[in-house]
Image (tube, rainbow, N blue to C red):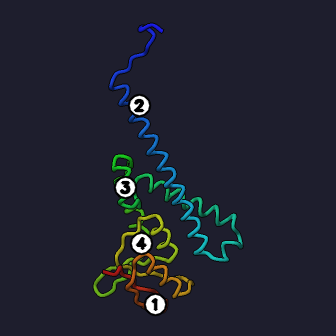
Amino acid sequence: MSSEEVPTYTDEDIDEWVNREVDWERIRRWQSYLLAKRQGYIIDRQRNLGSEYFTNSKQWDTIFSREWAALEERLNCGIGVDEDIMENFGEDFFQARESMLQEIDELYAELKDTHERKGDKLTIYTYEDFLMLSNQGIFRDKVFILDPQRKWRKVVEKKLREYGYDDIERIVIQEVNYLVVAKGE
């Protein structure tokens, strides 16, 4: 082989290849992270439904897939991603985060049902909404009112404690039982 046939590469070419390889590695790790989160999400949703899941698993799987699509979109923007994961991938890895947060805030502001209690305006969430928002990593309220729906109170309170809400008080609003929930200090 003559010296004319030997390709030459600049430092910029080599840097570009290395950076491209690093980006592919980050994408592969991100996809693995999303797969693990999806599996955990599906298992958690099935566990929360209990035997009801098996009455129509195809319908529930379809619902879970739609919920996951929304959750995945938020995760791809860095919303609900743990701080250590965010640091690992870097802020630049996640795009459109601020515009997505603003859109979510606007959407939930329109949907919120509130109740005045001790001079504070507290948002009322259903148990299912709380779980969905918490699992998506976008639940932000430190104090709120929870409608446990027809779930067993002890099961609901146990789940709330798993999410770090230790201060739980029972109240009645217009003859309906609710829980006032606060994060422990």
**Residue type marked 4:** Lys
Looking at the rendered image, the quarter that the C terminus falls into is bottom left
Q: CA distance from mark 2 to mark 1?
A: 65 Å
Distance between mark 3 and mark 1 Cα atoms = 43 Å
| Mark toward the viewer: 3 or 1 | 3
x and y, in percent, of residue 156 in the image: 50, 82
Instruction: Check disc 4: other Cα within 10 Å, few if <14, some if 14-19, many if 20+.
Output: few
Please determine whether, in this image, residue 41 is positioned above or below residue 55.
Answer: above
Q: CA distance from mark 4 to mark 3?
A: 29 Å
Number of residues whose C-alpha sits closer than 10 Å to that of mark 1, classed few (under 14), some (14–19) or many (20 or more): few
Disc sitting over residue 86 in the figure: 3
- Separation of disc 1 and disc 4 at Cα? 18 Å
**Label 3's element?**
helix
Name the residue located 41 percent from the left edge and 81 percent from the top edge.
145
The image's mark for residue 19 is none
The residue where tag 2 is placed is 17
Q: Are marks 3 and 2 in contact (CB under 8 Å)?
A: no
What amino acid does circle 3 point to? Met
The spot of residue 140 in percent (x, y) is 37, 69
